[in-house]
Amino acid sequence: MTDIYRAIADPTRRKILTLLSRNEYTQSELVDRFTISQPAVKKHLEILVEEDLVAERKEGRYRVYSLKRDNFKHQYEKLQQEIGSVLDNKLMNLKKYLEGESDGESH
């Protein structure tokens, strides 16, 4: 099961996902887009592959990475629902609190 929070927790992984949403890249092409080391980029790619958001394939001596669009879309929609639910609960609690104050209750 994908842990979308783990995947998007790091800004480098978010940037990789953004890049892969536009095009496929080899590992070396991705490394060229960052100021961090090749092993660091590789570690981020491994996490994204583990979380099943990025596909990796070999073409000759290169590894090519691409976004797994369907899985990413599904996980993104789940994330939106979870965040929406949390916000709805917070807003309901705020509404109850404010309505209680207007009824003369003290908090």
Image (spheres, rainbow, N blue to C red):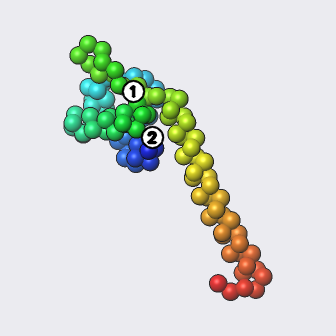
Residue located at (38% from left, 45% from top) = 11
What is the crowding at mark 2: few (fewer than 14 residues within 10 Å), some, or many (at least 20)? Answer: some
Q: Amino acid at mark 1?
A: Ala
Q: Is residue 36 visible?
A: yes
Check the image and report above or below for 53 versus 5. above
Report whether residue 15 is seen.
no
Which x, y percent locates residue 28? Answer: 26, 25
Identified at 65% across, 58% down, the residue is 88
Q: Quadrant of the N terminus?
A: top left
In the rendered structure, find residue 55 and report the number of the disc placed on it.
1
Q: Up-down: is 56 above or below 16?
A: above
Residue drawn 71% across the image and 72% down it: 96
Asked if marks 2 and 1 touch (Cβ < 8 Å), the reply is no
Relative to residue 71, is residue 91 depicted above or below?
Answer: below
Residue 8: horizontal and vertical position, in percent? 42, 44
> In the image, is 20 to the left or to the right of 61?
right
Which of pointers 2 and 1 lies earlier in the amino acid sequence?
Answer: 2
* The C terminus sits in image quarter: bottom right
Seen in the image, is 53 located left or right of residue 79? left
Q: Residue at x 30, y 18 (%)?
A: 58
Q: What SS does tag 2 mark?
A: loop
In the rendered image, the residue lying farthest to the right is: 103
Residue lying farthest to the top in this orientation: 60
**4 left or right of 48 in image:** right
Which image quadrant for residue 74?
Answer: top right
Mark-to-mark CA distance, 2 and 1: 13 Å
Q: Residues within 10 Å of mark 1 (few under 14, many from 20)?
A: some
Q: Which residue is mark 2?
A: 2
